[in-house]
Image: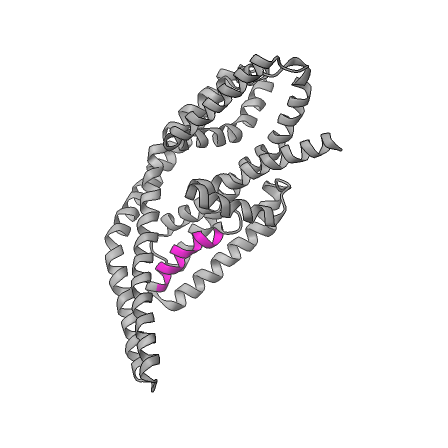
């Protein structure tokens, strides 16, 4: 059954207007995106409680009370130390910069004793100056960016509230969305939506849990090694771990840099510890929690990540794989209909 011409045109116009609106207000979307991730994460326990005889609202209230109690305990025991480390990090960034500058100057003094042609020496001098400036800017931007990123997370406290309303009205929202689809196409649309949900739901829930486990293990390892700001670094590793392939490298850079400024030997130990944590995640944690992947070829995932960072920066990094997974499901659906 095809839509009448005017109705089809109106639907296309409304869809285009909605996409344009999303583009215009894109700066306020992060809490809503996080709320969608929380909805994927919390919907299974809500449905479990509903199957046990509770209403959906009662199940939500109980779940939020439990999570709120857990958050209060974590806030009481962890947040003071977290804030103290964040404040100390901001104070230490200038000292780290001076320490790095002294290290580069020491290397430069050692190399000046070597017999080199004047032209080569001048080129090396310029290279060292460029390296020095780049390293200083890099340390300040990485550490400062990490601090601002962590601080900016507090602006997303709206996400649990949005997730509550999404979870409360999820079945009604799904039913309302179905009414927008012509009856003749609903069965096909439902099948497509179930496939998308199966591809995304387990991935989002599993990836968040894997990232939390990896961040916790990394924080413990860094603390045992005596690395400064181990809690902050573990949280940063957890945040970047949701990014496929490049996430573990990005997460390890601040930890290795801070360890290097404490001691080169400590930096090597940190590299070894983080490699072990990543291997444990890849071999044990990820297969058990996430299981199957989103069904994308590694080259597709890498392309999606690079395209995401090119188009939307840090937000694009996080959304690249889920968006690619949805397009993958749609592509397979179109191919199956053509076949």
Q: Which one is in front, 232 or 306?
A: 306
31 horizontally vs 191: left or right: left
How far across and down, in percent of the image, does residue 334 sit? 68, 32
Colouring convention used in this rendered image of the protein: one colour
Image position of 53 with respect to 273: above or below: above
Image position of 209 with respect to 112: above or below: above
Q: Which one is in front, 101 or 24?
A: 24
Image position of 53 with respect to 317: above or below: above
> Which residue lies at the image location 42% right of the left edge and 24% below the top edge?
162
Secondary structure character of the magenta stretch overall: helix
32 horizontally vs 147: left or right: right
Residue 243 seen from this side: no
Q: Quadrant of residue 110?
A: bottom left
How far across and down, in percent of the image, does residue 253 sit? 41, 56
The total of numbered circles placed on residues is 0
63 horizontally vs 189: left or right: left
Magenta residues span 248-260
How far across and down, in percent of the image, does residue 257 sit? 37, 60
């Amino acid at each position: 059954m095809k839509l009448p011409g005017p109705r089809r045109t109106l639907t296309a116009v409304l869809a285009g207007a909605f996409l344009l609106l999303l583009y215009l207000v894109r700066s306020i979307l992060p809490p809503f995106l996080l709320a969608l991730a929380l909805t994927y994460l919390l919907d299974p326990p809500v449905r479990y409680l509903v199957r046990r005889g509770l209403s959906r609202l009662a199940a939500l209230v109980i779940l939020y009370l439990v999570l709120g109690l857990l958050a209060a305990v974590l806030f009481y025991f962890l947040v003071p130390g977290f804030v103290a480390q964040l404040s100390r990090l901001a104070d230490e960034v200038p000292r780290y910069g001076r320490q790095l500058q002294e290290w580069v100057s020491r290397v430069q003094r050692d190399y000046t004793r070597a017999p080199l042609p004047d032209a080569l020496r001048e080129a090396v001098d310029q290279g060292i100056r460029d390296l020095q400036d780049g390293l200083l800017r890099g340390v300040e931007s990485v550490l400062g960016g990490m601090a601002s990123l962590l601080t900016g997370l507090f602006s997303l406290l709206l996400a649990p509230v949005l997730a509550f309303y999404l979870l409360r009205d999820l079945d009604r929202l799904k039913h309302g969305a179905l009414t927008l689809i012509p009856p003749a196409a609903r069965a096909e649309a439902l099948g497509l939506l179930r496939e998308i949900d199966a591809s995304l739901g387990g991935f989002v829930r599993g990836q968040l849990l894997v990232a939390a486990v990896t961040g916790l293990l990394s924080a413990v390892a860094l603390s045992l090694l005596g690395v400064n700001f181990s809690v902050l670094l573990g949280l940063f590793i957890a945040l970047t771990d949701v990014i496929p392939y490049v996430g573990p490298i990005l997460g390890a850079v601040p930890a290795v840099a801070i360890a290097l400024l404490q001691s080169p030997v400590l930096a090597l130990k940190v590299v070894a510890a983080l490699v072990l944590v990543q291997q444990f995640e890849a071999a044990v944690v990820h297969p058990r929690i996430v299981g199957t992947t989103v069904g994308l070829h590694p080259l597709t995932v890498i392309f999606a990540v690079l395209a995401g960072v090119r188009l939307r920066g840090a937000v694009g990094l996080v959304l690249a794989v889920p968006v690619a997974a949805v397009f993958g499901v749609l592509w397979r659906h179109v191919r199956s209909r053509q076949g």
